[in-house]
Image: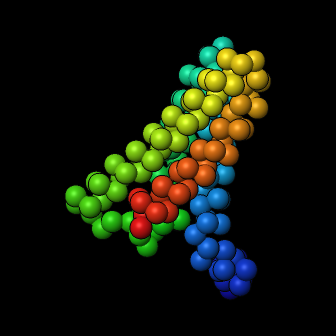
Amino acid sequence: MTVLDIAPLNRLRQLVLARYILASVGALAVDMGTFRALLSAGMTPVTASAIGYSIGIAVHWVLSSRKVFADQVAAGGIARTRQKAMFVVSALIGLAVTTMIVGGASAAGLDPSIAKLCAIVVSFTVTWLLRKRVVFR
């Protein structure tokens, strides 16, 4: 018996939203780590946020296509290319949302990290809905 044979873990693997949340946490860790490192290096909050988010996108694709929506990934060819393009579009929408929130809130004098946390909530909701209902349907 392995750890993956434990009943609660089997149920967790079956829950798409739970897997998506876990994938998002992993991608978010990369995003925020990059964001904080770039801020510490003197980069502007908007640029640091965009770069962090972009690197997080790559991590999220790998996790989403292999662990979250593996049963809905297109087999190959044009269908797979189209799906990847839709994933990138959903990510760019999330990036735009994140960048606008961080930029606007920072310009208003809000701490960039607080602005980023607000952006995370909104961007997560938008990208989850797009990916669940459009990209991996």
Q: Quick check: 72 above or below 114?
A: below
Question: Please, which residue is most extreme toward the left here?
Answer: 78
Instruction: List x then y, in percent, for residue 108.
Output: 71, 19
Front in this rendered view, residue 90 or 3: 90
- Please say whether residue 2 is visible from this viewpoint: no
Q: Quick check: 107 above or below 34?
A: above
User: Which residue is drawn at the image coordinates 63% and 31% (left, top)?
Assistant: 101
Instruction: List x then y, in percent, for residue 116.
Output: 69, 33
Instruction: List x then y, in percent, for residue 30.
Output: 62, 41
In which image quadrant can residue 5 be found? bottom right
Q: Quadrant of the C terminus?
A: bottom left
Q: Quadrant of the N terminus?
A: bottom right
Task: Give left or right: position of 78 versus 15.
Answer: left
Front in this rendered view, residue 128 or 64: 128
User: Which residue is drawn at the image coordinates 69% and 25% (left, top)?
Assistant: 105
Q: Quick check: 99 above or below 136?
A: above
In which image quadrant can residue 40 be found? top right
User: Which residue is drawn at the image coordinates 53% and 65% (left, top)?
Assistant: 68
Instruction: List x then y, in percent, for residue 122.
Output: 63, 44
Question: Please, which residue is most extreme toward the top here?
Answer: 42
Task: Give left or right: position of 100 versus 111.
Answer: left
Q: How many marks?
A: 0
Q: How is the image coloured?
A: rainbow
- Please say whether residue 24 is visible from this viewpoint: yes
